Image (cartoon, rainbow, N blue to C red):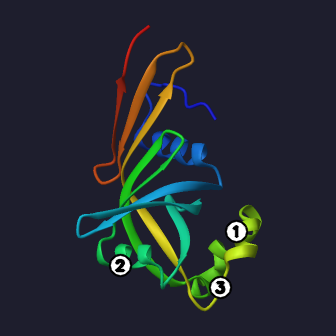
Amino acid sequence: MKFTLDKDITYEQAVGRMFEMLGNSQIMALASSLNDYVMVRNVSCLFYDEKIYFKTDKNFRKTKQLLENPNVAMCWSGVQVEGIACNKGLVTDEPGQRFAEGYKKYLWQSYNKYSHEDTEILIEVIPKYVEIWDTSDDGYAFQLFIDFEKKQIEIKLYDEK
């Protein structure tokens, strides 16, 4: 999906467009670190309530990292997210089962291969700062910065033709 440059975009519109770009689900790169040891791996994500959700086994190394240092970075196709990861408990214990239902619907292959109800925990990532790279319809590269904490945005042209 093309993100169109609009210098009059509001914070709410920018957040809406970001999640529109991400859609219902994506495979995102997740970076985490602990004691100066950085890891990156792909995770199958769902997006709702202006947050990012994925599941992981509670026994994995990445889970240890997330629990001890919740600061994460995620990336998909020009959308770069910095945020805080929160353990929401077992996927099966989520009220309303929104994640489980979405995972079945949008990520069936992953759901079918990698679901272990007794060890899978739900991780919620609360975005703090987002940078979106794209090109306007007239060919100019730009960056859109979304500060979720200050509820502010900034648009910077990267270059001009």
Q: Which mark is residue 32?
A: none
Image quarter in which the C terminus is found = top left
Q: Secondary structure at mark 1?
A: helix
Marks 1/3: CA–CA distance? 11 Å
Q: Read off the residue under disc 1.
A: 110
Q: CA distance from mark 3 to mark 2?
A: 20 Å
Asked if 132 appears above or below 6 in the picture, the reply is below
Kind of residue indicated by mark 3:
His
Check disc 1: other Cα within 10 Å, few if <14, some if 14-19, many if 20+: few
Q: Is residue 79 left or right of residue 36?
A: right
Residue at x 47% of width, y 49% of height: 75
For mark 3, give the secondary structure.
Answer: loop
> Residue at position x 30%, y 77% from top?
68
Q: Position of residue 141 (x, y in %)?
A: 45, 21
Circle 3 packing at 10 Å, graded few (<14), some (14-19), many (20+), is some
Counting from the top left corner in percent of width and height, residue 158 is at: 36, 21
Q: Which residue is under mark 2?
A: 67
Image location of residue 108, percent across then percent down: 76, 67
